[in-house]
Amino acid sequence: MTHPLELSERILTSGIVDSPPNRVTNELSELADDLAIVESFSHCVALRTGEGLVAFDASGVFTGAAVVEALQRWSPEPVTHLVYTHGHADHVGGSPSFTAAYGAPTVLAHEAVAARLDRYAYTDGWNRRINARQFGGVRRQDGVGVGADAERFLPADVLRPDIAFRDRHSVTVGDDTIELVHARGETDDHLWAWLPERRWIMAGDFFIWNFPNAGNPQKVQRYPLEWAAALRDMAAAGADLFVPAHGLPIAGADRIAEVLDITATALETLVTEVVTMMNDGAVLDDIVHSVHVPDDVLARPWLRPLYDDPEFVVRNVWRQYGGWWDGVPSRLKPSPDRQVAVVLAELAGGAERLAERAAAAAADGDLRLAAHLADLAGWAAPDDPAVHGVRADVYEQRRKVETSLMAKGIFGAASKESAAISQP
């Protein structure tokens, strides 16, 4: 396997992504003296202090054990401290494996992580269904589902923070000082870690080698403008090594500063354009179809929209600054979708006519319109196999042409939903 720093430099120098930057191998690579990364989902980065290992993130519930095994092969020192960069499941779910191997390490996190874990327990079913749609129903190696049919979104024995802070916190382990800095970005409980003597940054998900995950349509509020500010703070630190929790590490102060500046500018520009249109009185529909990130920006090897989608970020900016109503009066207190669909089907001459028009729109390449019509047809005729066969086909076509995993997952789930009706 190509060393992560070698692959990172090759991609950034050439601008060509000739090998996936987001790898889930559970293999460990040394990045510097006393620093190693286990590339997983998410990565775990480990600092060897002489007085124990400090681990940044625990990876997920189904990868935590493999991560711990890799760390044990690297060093006989126990993990004495575990830093959560934020409370997402793929960063905290593997913590029980750390307890099993080392006893309970001291867990450090932002103060909002505990509330997030409580919310995950409260909305367990919702989060399992999100995963089933977003990731297509990921399966464990033993065949047990981690989507809607998983027993829990997070196991009950995920480690809770022992030390929680609000803005900044400094901890010294051995001769290493670690400064933890809170900033809102993908989440409200995110932090990044700065090791001033080593000039290293552990960035968590502030950088993921994809366009920033600032718009996820199934998740709570993201904070793109604050995210950009955090990237600028990290760039100003002058780090020589920058290690995200997804994707490849980046070496060299100038390279790091350039990458972070371009990413921050992309977020700032998008937010500014959305808010400017909001201030001018535009409704969400106008904004969504007017504000775009330039293609040359999205062509950057670390900004490709393969996970989130800039269009979703536009909607998230609207939600952050303007609330949930999209500005169209009929959608403030609407009729049920099926009621509207039945009336439109009557006017069109039947649900099958809507389905035919959906198929025609898809054949013309207008998959957005095709999806609207297919949904109307499906709502008007919820048990009609032929109608749902068309809907299944339309959404399968949408899934294939999308770049972002989130869109692919949602459209794929819609296709499967109708396929089950069309082929009982």
Image (cartoon, rainbow, N blue to C red):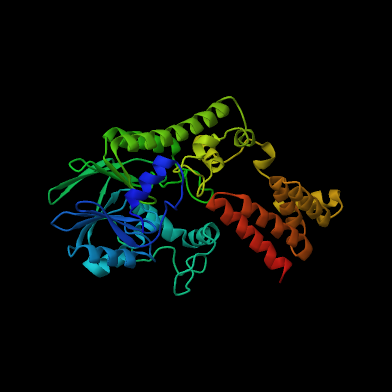
Q: Residue furthest top?
A: 280
Residue 226 visible in image: no
Q: Is residue 332 left or right of residue 377?
A: left
**In the rendered image, the vertical position of residue 420 relative to residue 3, given as above or below:** below
Q: Whole-percent x and y of residue 408?
A: 58, 54
342 w.r.t. 313: above or below: below
Residue at point 44% right, 75% down? Answer: 142
In the rendered structure, the answer to whether residue 360 lies left or right of residue 7 reads right
Residue situated in front as seen by the camera: 408 or 21: 21
Q: Position of residue 159 (x, y in %)?
A: 30, 61
In the image, farthest residue toward the right:
349
* Picture coordinates of residue 201, whole percent (x, y): 28, 43
Give the total number of marks visible in the rendering.
0
Image quadrant in which the N terminus is located: bottom left
At x 60% / y 33%, what residue is drawn? 287
Q: Residue at x 43, y 41 (%)?
A: 14
Q: Looking at this view, is 303 or 279 the one in front? A: 303
Q: In the visual, does 391 lie left or right of 257?
A: right
Question: In which quadrant will I find the C terminus?
Answer: bottom right
Q: Nearer the viewer, residue 118 or 20?
A: 20
State the image coordinates of residue 416 (x, y, percent, origin top left). Answer: 64, 63
Residue in view at x 39 percent, y 51 percent = 246
On the rendered structure, is 92 left or right of 73? right
Residue 296 appears in the picture as rendered: yes
Farthest-out residue, bottom: 142
